Image (cartoon, helix red, strand yellow):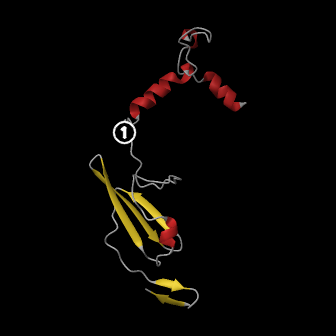
Amino acid sequence: QQFEKITSWFHFNNNTNQKAPEKPGFDTLYKIRPIIEFLQNRFITVEESLAIGEQICATKAKYLLDSKLTLEANMKKMPRGTSLEYTVTVDSVDISNIAWKDHKIVNLVTSFVEQEPQITVRRYDRKLKTNHF
């Protein structure tokens, strides 16, 4: 009830100038159009080419950028910690496709980092109940 009272007195546009719904040029947002235009002028304009950065995107694509990564079945036979990298240049940007074997095979496609430098980390082995490198 209070909301309806407020909205009945809250006007941004002259209702007498609004076109009828059946006429061409009818604007469904006519009553709040001045607010929309004000906000659009205040907002930052978005570029035509927008890049997704620092974001993880899932994909079911079988082949990424024509990279020749080893098949998952072959990589499963390799020891844990094995990693492969293939780099492709697209529009003068190097894109690295990196795959490494942990408990499962992890894939990363990036234009930000490369495979090197690699470091050795300490892992806990549940069977032996010890840390090892």
**Measuring 42% from the left and 80% from the top, which residue is drawn there?**
121
Percent from the top left, x then y, of residue 90? 31, 48
In the rendered image, the quadrant that contains the N terminus is: top right
What is the three-letter code of the residue carrying label 1? Ser
**Measuring 47% from the left and 72% from the top, which residue is drawn there?**
101
Left or right: residue 74 versus residue 51 is right
Left or right: residue 57 versus residue 16 is left
Viewer-proximal residue among 54 and 109: 109
Left or right: residue 116 versus residue 58 is left
Say above or below: 18 vs 67.
above
**Measuring 54% from the left and 86% from the top, which residue is drawn there?**
125
Percent from the top left, x then y, of residue 73? 52, 68
Location of mark 1 (residue): 49
Viewer-proximal residue among 98 and 120: 98
Secondary structure of residue under mark 1? loop
Say above or below: 119 vs 22.
below
Say above or below: 112 vs 34.
below
Viewer-proximal residue among 43 and 47: 47
Neighbour tally class for label 1: few under 14, some 14-19, many 20 plus, Cα within 10 Å: few
The residue most toward the right is: 1
Report how many numbered discs are placed on residues in the image: 1
Percent from the top left, x then y, of residue 18? 56, 12
Percent from the top left, x then y, of residue 98? 40, 64
Say above or below: 30 vs 131.
above
In the rendered image, the quadrant that contains the C terminus is: bottom left
Viewer-proximal residue among 106 and 34: 106
